Image (cartoon, rainbow, N blue to C red):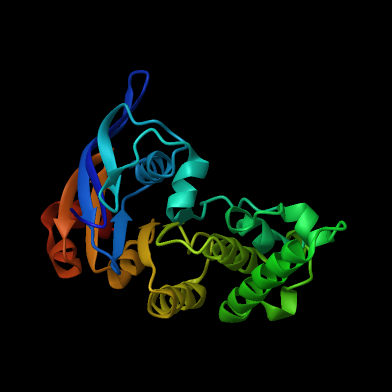
Amino acid sequence: MSFFAVDGLTMRFGGLTALDDVSFEVDRGMIFSIIGPNGSGKSTAFNCISGIYQPTAGKIYFEGEGISGLAPHHIARLGIARTFQNIELFSTETTIDNLMLGRHQHMHSGVWSGVAMLGRATSAAREETENRERVQWIIELLDLVRVRDRPVGELPYGTQKRVELARALAMEPKLLLVDEPSAGMNADERAEVAVRMRELRAELDVTILLIEHHVQLAIGLADRVLALNFGKPIAQGAPEEIRQHPEVIKAYLGDG
């Protein structure tokens, strides 16, 4: 059994079929990209994987165990974390506090009580210190030291995207779902995203499942690629195969 697998995933909303019999496998340590235009079903797939949606049909497996139908917090505890296309951070909280919230599943004394040190015992204080040290390491890894104590709502869009990625990493995932990391970015910023994804895989030994509207970035990063069109898989394979696939060229690469 593969590290992660989707088998016959189908998602219907009334008369609309957002995903239609989608299957793929991801090996441990891989960067696997799902490409497609808006409305192709990429984010729907992520919502099914992370437990936000319950699939109409099909199965999802992680480390050999079925996870279809599990609640999002159960899936997160198994070691799957995600970012979102639309940034979902606590805008009035600082960078470090947002990351500490990402550590909640590793903390037994409670996030807010641990952060505020409300008369907790020595074990709780030790736990809070250890988690803060881990968060600080992630902050340094993603070059967020200068904004560590600033409310994230005050930060530029690109920096907020990094904070959201850092919060997902604070969960110490085995599988990281990255949703449109270059959305709203220019060419230089997209290049930085590509470098960062490769560094994270090498540094953290994390498997990455990536969805990205910018197909050149997605294909350039990936070990394998799945192309969707209107919820249906039209091609799957190595990056060079996808670049040369007639249906992919027609659907995604024809406009550059």
Q: Is residue 92 visible?
A: no
Q: Position of residue 171 (x, y in %)?
A: 54, 60
- Taking the spot 71% from the left edge, 54% from the top edge, the residue there is 109
Query: Vertical placement of 33 versus 88: above or below?
Result: below
Residue at image x 48%, y 49%?
Answer: 76
Q: Nearer the viewer, residue 231 or 214?
A: 231
Q: Is residue 25 above or below residue 200?
A: above
Q: Is 49 drawn above or below residue 151 in the view shown?
A: above
In which quadrant will I find the C terminus? Answer: bottom left
Instruction: Say left or right for 15 vs 95.
Output: left
Residue 216 appears left or right of 233: right
Percent across and percent down for residue 55 are 34, 31
- Identify the image quadrant of residue 124: bottom right
Q: Position of residue 46 (x, y in %)?
A: 40, 46
Q: Residue 126: horizontal and vertical position, in percent?
A: 72, 69
Foreground residue, 37 or 99?
Answer: 99
Q: Quadrant of residue 22?
A: top left
200 or 18: nearer the viewer: 200
Q: Is residue 58 above or below residue 2?
A: above
Asked if one can make out residue 43 in the rendered structure from this viewpoint, the answer is: yes
The residue positioned 50% from the left and 64% from the top of the image is: 172
